[in-house]
Amino acid sequence: MRIITHTCPVCDTVVAANELEDNRVMKCPGLRCQEVLRFEELSENAREHFLEYRERYQI
Ligand SMILES: [Zn+2]
């Protein structure tokens, strides 16, 4: 299964797409990083893939 992640542009912390999808908007989990990450920031291709197969990403 394809792993979809989003990388924080500020600190390079990697966040799983399913975490982002749950929250839609979340503060970067990186230490001392205040960046806000949004599901919409994933590439369109990644979002489509994730939504199509979202059941498989529920762990
Ligand atoms: Zn960050």
Image (cartoon, rainbow, N blue to C red):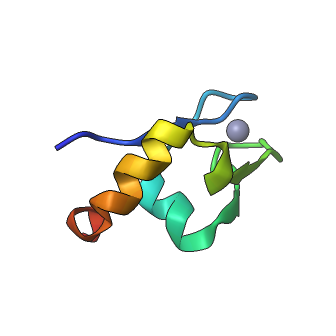
What x and y, as percent, mark residue 5? 45, 41
Tell me if residue 40 comes above or below residue 9 in the rendering: below
- Say which quadrant the N terminus sits in: top left
Of the four image quadrants, the one with ligand 1 is: top right
Q: Nearer the viewer, residue 52 or 56?
A: 52
Q: Residue furthest left?
A: 1
- Looking at the image, can residue 16 be seen? no
17 displayed left or right of 30: left
Q: What's the residue at 24%, 39% (across, down)?
A: 2
Q: Residue at x 70, y 63 (%)?
A: 25
Q: Residue furthest right?
A: 34
Q: Residue at x 40, y 61 (%)?
A: 51
Location of residue 15 in the rendering, given as x and y in whole percent from the top left corner: 51, 46
Residue 14 place in picture, x, y as percent? 51, 37
Q: Is residue 29 above or below residue 53?
A: above
Q: Position of residue 26 (x, y in %)?
A: 69, 61
Tell whether 8 sits left or right of 20.
right
Q: Is residue 53 visible?
A: yes
Which residue is found at the position 56% from the left and 37% from the top? 43
Of residue 20 and residue 41, the one placed in the foreground of this image is: 41
Left or right of 41 in this view: 35: right
In which quadrant of the rendered view does residue 38 lie?
bottom right
Which quadrant holds residue 31? top right
Q: Is the residue 43 above or below the residue 37 in the image?
A: above
**Total labels drawn:** 0
- Say if 48 sits above or below 19 in the image: above
Query: Along the line of sight, which residue is nearer the eye, 41 or 15?
Result: 41
Q: Quadrant of the C terminus?
A: bottom left
